[in-house]
């Protein structure tokens, strides 16, 4: 749960940072450099969505685990949702890295 909240907050901060970079670049840089700074808003929104998805999966897994603990039946642990979220976060992280590298090369 805390991870989902953190990812959501980071996405919001990233979106705001992209807006700040865009505003600074608009007043200081040429139009061609300004076009290279696109993508911060989209990356921030993607992180917010990933955070909300993480919250949903964490809640679902908590409820499922609580039910399994109360039952007497043996159960197996499904790691697919965790691996899928990890892959999504990896791709988003690579996208953010590309955005930051592109933004710093413009400034």
Image (cartoon, rainbow, N blue to C red):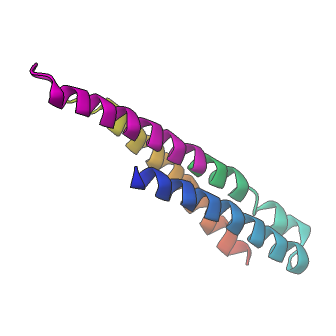
| Count of number-bearing discs | 0
Residue furthest toward the top?
A: 73
Give whichever of 14, 69 is nearer the camera.
Answer: 69
Q: Which residue does the image show at 55% across and 61% down from the upper left?
A: 10
Q: Which residue does the image show at 39% across and 44% down from the upper left?
A: 86
Is 78 located above or below residue 32 in the figure?
Answer: above
Q: Which residue does the image show at 63% across and 59% down from the upper left?
A: 12
On the image, the x and y values in percent for residue 79 come to: 27, 33
Is 13 located above or below residue 94 in the figure?
Answer: below
Magenta stretch holds residue 66: yes
Give whichever of 66, 58 is nearer the camera.
Answer: 66
Q: Is residue 105 visible to the viewer in this orientation of the structure?
A: yes
Q: Is residue 76 visible to the viewer in this orientation of the structure?
A: no
Q: Is residue 32 left or right of residue 14?
A: right
**Magenta segment:** 48-76
On the image, the x and y values in percent for residue 59 come to: 39, 38
Q: Is residue 20 left or right of residue 54?
A: right
Q: Which residue does the image show at 64% across and 53% down from the upper left?
A: 43
Most common secondary structure along the magenta stretch: helix
Give whichever of 80, 51 is nearer the camera.
Answer: 51
**Which quarter of the figure is the C terminus placed in?**
bottom right
In the rendered image, which quarter is residue 3 located in? bottom left
On the image, the x and y values in percent for residue 28 come to: 87, 80
Magenta stretch holds residue 2: no
In the rendered image, which quarter is residue 82 located in? top left
């Amino acid at each position: 749960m805390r991870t989902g909240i953190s990812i959501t907050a980071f996405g919001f901060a990233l979106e705001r940072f992209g807006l700040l970079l865009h505003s600074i670049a608009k007043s200081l840089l040429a139009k061609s450099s300004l076009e290279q700074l696109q993508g911060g808003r989209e990356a921030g929104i993607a992180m917010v969505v990933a955070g909300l998805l993480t919250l949903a999966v964490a809640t679902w897994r908590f409820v499922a685990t609580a039910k399994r603990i109360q039952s007497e039946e043996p159960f197996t642990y499904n790691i697919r949702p965790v691996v899928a979220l990890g892959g999504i976060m990896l791709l988003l992280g690579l996208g953010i890295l590309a955005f930051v590298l592109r933004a710093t090369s413009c400034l």
